[in-house]
Image (cartoon, rainbow, N blue to C red):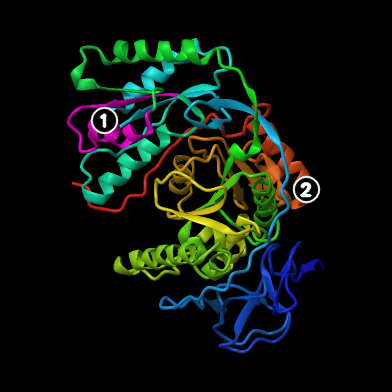
């Protein structure tokens, strides 16, 4: 039998290979646990026993319920590690407008789903023209942009504008229709303060032939972009996005803590990292709060947590409406258990900032970003805030990728072998040097993520659709 006891305070262990009717990655009781007694894993409460549980019995959804308190109050007790400074460089594309890109790409972004086909046809014709150092020309299509109101419409405008600012984009063409709610002039105004000269725009209703008009712009972009060369750049210009999806019982034991070590390493080199998925902080938010660098960051973090909880309850849902069926199949019983594993991706250093949805990263170090847990929405938000790459841990597997390279990190051997066409790295080895070297190869353009040809975006939909 192979069991793992994570913390000396735990009253459950994780079976690594399976025992009897208990699958690998699931929990078993280390001693008799009485009904109403708290279940302890990671040295933290992950739930409450719904019935008496005998020593050695399976501890899961049939006999455990969440212990989350929707009305909990928070206090600030700073506790974070100080990291030794290191130096490192990578080979990327220096941008005159700020941080470096890890790809030389051209984005075609519709303001509204009505012009998706226009953007797709433009991107398709560009494929035969790609050469030099260009990594790709991509149409980042979506179904929204019209019939949204208020904050919902503002969110779409904000994310489209923020995507256009990502340093991986050498050039961006934003294509409007002309009559949509998400008007092109609003996007132009949102981007005006950034003074970018690598972004162009047009409305299809205002030109005679939208395809020839768009191709004239894109041919000019391609001619310029293909001449760019990678340069040596300080790693302090790198920002990694932290995301997990399709978690299992090994997520908090292998992939997430391993990515946490990478986060610490990147931060020690002056770089940045962004953690999102606010609902997957519930039950572990106190650990991040106590790493906030000062009271101001703590207060903003508390507000983000409380606002997101209110968003749930105002819609008539409990804050613990999670984990998903796949998470439960993988051995995760409650939201707080999932959260305690999820937040490990942030490493051990301090939290330096709290970002609103669509806001650009500003501080070196770890920032938390307001956004939901949904894989594609959250990963899009990470790229929109300035991450050049997303480190995506998974115990179940997924073929998706957002609009920046999305490196899939498996939590277990079975998934890594079974879905080798999806998975870039097997974290069950806990090979920190191996993962860091693969990330550097990806950043340098020497390695292409398994899912990198897939480019998708999604929005955090919050309001009425007309």
Q: Nearer the viewer, residue 192 or 348?
A: 192
Q: Is residue 353 visible?
A: yes
Please tell me whether residue 8 belongs to the stretch shown in magenta.
no
Position of 179 with respect to 319 (left or right) is left
The residues colored magenta run 171-195
Compared with 17, 261 (above or below) is above
Q: Is residue 333 visible?
A: no
Q: Nearer the viewer, residue 253 or 74?
A: 74
Residue under pointer 2 = 431
The x and y percentages for residue 15 are 73, 67
Dot 2, crowdedness within 10 Å: few (<14), some or many (≥20)?
few
- Residue drawn 50% across and 76% down? 75
- Residue drawn 73% across and 80% down? 30
Residue under pointer 1 = 114
The x and y percentages for residue 63 are 57, 79
Callout 2 secondary element: loop
The residue most toward the right is 1
- Residue drawn 59% across and 56% down? 247
Please tell me whether residue 183 belongs to the stretch shown in magenta.
yes
- Residue drawn 62% across and 40% down? 236
Position of 142 with respect to 398 (left or right) is left
* Separation of marks 2 and 1 at Cα, in angstroms: 46 Å
Compared with 173, 77 (above or below) is below
The x and y percentages for residue 50 are 54, 83
The x and y percentages for residue 166 are 47, 34
């Amino acid at each position: 039998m192979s069991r793992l006891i994570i913390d000396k305070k735990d009253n459950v262990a994780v079976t690594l290979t399976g025992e009897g009717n208990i699958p690998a990655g699931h929990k078993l009781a280390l001693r008799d646990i009485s009904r109403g007694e708290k279940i302890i894993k990671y040295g933290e409460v992950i739930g409450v026993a719904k019935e008496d549980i005998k020593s050695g019995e399976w501890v899961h959804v049939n006999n455990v319920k969440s212990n989350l308190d929707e009305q909990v109050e928070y206090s600030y007790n700073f506790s974070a590690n100080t990291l030794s400074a290191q130096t490192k460089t990578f080979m990327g594309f220096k941008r005159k407008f700020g941080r470096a890109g890890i790809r030389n790409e051209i984005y075609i972004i519709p303001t509204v789903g009505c012009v998706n086909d226009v953007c797709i046809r433009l991107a398709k014709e560009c494929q035969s023209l790609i050469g030099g150092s260009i990594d790709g020309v991509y149409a980042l299509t979506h179904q929204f942009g019209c019939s949204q109101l208020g904050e919902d419409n503002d969110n779409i405008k904000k994310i489209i504008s923020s995507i256009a600012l990502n340093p991986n984009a050498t050039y961006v063409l934003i294509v409007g229709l002309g009559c949509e709610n998400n008007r092109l002039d609003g996007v132009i105004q949102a981007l005006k303060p950034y003074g970018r000269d690598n972004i162009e725009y047009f409305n299809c209703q205002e030109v005679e032939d939208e395809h020839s008009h768009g191709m004239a712009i894109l041919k000019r972009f391609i001619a310029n972009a293909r001449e760019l060369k990678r340069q040596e750049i300080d790693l302090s210009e790198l920002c990694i996005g932290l995301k997990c999806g399709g978690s299992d019982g090994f997520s908090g034991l292998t992939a997430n803590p391993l990515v946490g070590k990478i986060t610490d390493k990147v931060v020690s080199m002056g770089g940045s990292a962004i953690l999102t998925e606010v609902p997957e902080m519930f039950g572990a938010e106190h650990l991040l709060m106590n790493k906030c660098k000062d009271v101001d960051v703590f207060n903003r973090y508390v507000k983000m947590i409380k606002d997101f909880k209110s968003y749930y309850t105002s819609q008539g849902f409990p804050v613990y409406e999670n984990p998903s069926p796949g998470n439960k199949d993988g051995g995760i019983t409650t939201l707080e258990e999932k959260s305690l594993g999820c937040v490990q991706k942030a490493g051990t250093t301090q939290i330096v900032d709290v970002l609103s949805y669509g806001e650009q990263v500003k501080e070196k170090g770890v920032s938390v970003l307001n956004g939901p847990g949904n894989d594609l929405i959250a990963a899009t938000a990470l790229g929109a805030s300035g991450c050049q790459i997303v480190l995506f841990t998974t115990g179940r597997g997924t073929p998706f990728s957002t609009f920046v390279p999305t490196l899939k990190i498996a939590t277990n051997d079975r998934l890594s072998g079974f879905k080798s066409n999806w998975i870039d790295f097997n974290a069950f080895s806990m090979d920190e040097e191996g993962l860091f070297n693969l990330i550097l190869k990806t950043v340098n353009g020497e390695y292409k993520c398994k899912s990198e040809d897939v480019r998708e975006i999604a929005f955090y939909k919050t309001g009425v659709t007309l």
